[in-house]
Image: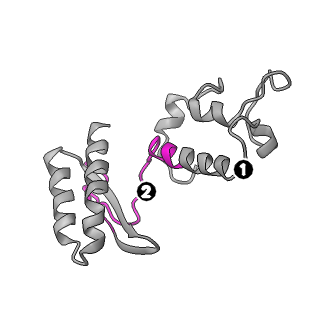
Amino acid sequence: MRWLSLVTLYFLLSLPAAAADPDLRPLLDKIDALRREHAIPGVGIAIVSQAKVLWVGGFGVMDLQTRQPVTADTIFRIGSVTKMFTALGLIMLDEARKLSLDQPVRELTPDAPYTNPHERTHPVTVAQLLEHTAGLQDLSKAEFEHSDPKP
């Protein structure tokens, strides 16, 4: 995960300069150089500024055996990276009083596919999901490693 953090950090620090400069080639060259320096096989990038997409594409390969290149359409398992966006969105909804972090998840999504044998006395709350204290079972190793984009 160290390499993902490096690429993400470098990308985020460089984005304001890239948005101001219409020529993204220097930034893209730096991202690819960083990828190579840390022996990252492939990376997908989307650079956006407000509502405008500035560049979408990839560097390196998506498969070491076939050497198939990363493109704008390459599917990556992004896993935990989405947690910060989800948490931020839920905090913003809480601040806008559109939901409460202490609200039971069943009130928001009555048909959510999980089983809580203690639902009546200890319902799972939004905050517990964010804190990973809900007691729900995580993906199994086989489920996590399943990479078919159409399960």
Quarter placement of the N terminus? top left
| Crowd rating for badge 2 (residues with CA inside 10 Å; few <14, some 14–19, many 20+) | few
Q: Please name the residue shown 21% across and 77% down the image.
A: 23
| Crowd rating for badge 1 (residues with CA inside 10 Å; few <14, some 14–19, many 20+) | few
- For label 1, the SS is loop
Is any part of residue 83 visible from this angle?
yes
Q: Please name the residue shown 41% across and 52% down the image.
A: 76
70 left or right, relative to 32:
right
Q: Which residue is mark 1?
A: 97
Residue 126 x, y percent position in the rendering: 68, 37
Is any part of residue 109 visible from this angle?
no
Q: Residue 135, relative to residue 13: is it above or below?
A: above
Q: Is residue 49 magenta?
A: no
- For label 2, the SS is loop
Kind of residue at badge 1: Arg
Q: Which residue is mark 2?
A: 75
Q: Observer-nearest residue: 149 or 122?
A: 122
Residue 101 x, y percent position in the rendering: 68, 38
50 left or right, relative to 69:
right
Q: Earlier in the sequence, mark 1 or mark 2?
A: 2
Q: Observer-nearest residue: 127 or 129?
A: 127
Q: Which residues are magenta?
A: 56-85
Q: Please name the residue shown 40% across and 73% down the image.
A: 53
Q: Observer-nearest residue: 97 or 3?
A: 97
Q: Residue 86, relative to residue 55: is it above or below?
A: above
Kind of residue at badge 2: Ile
Q: Is residue 61 magenta?
A: yes
Residue 141 x, y percent position in the rendering: 49, 29
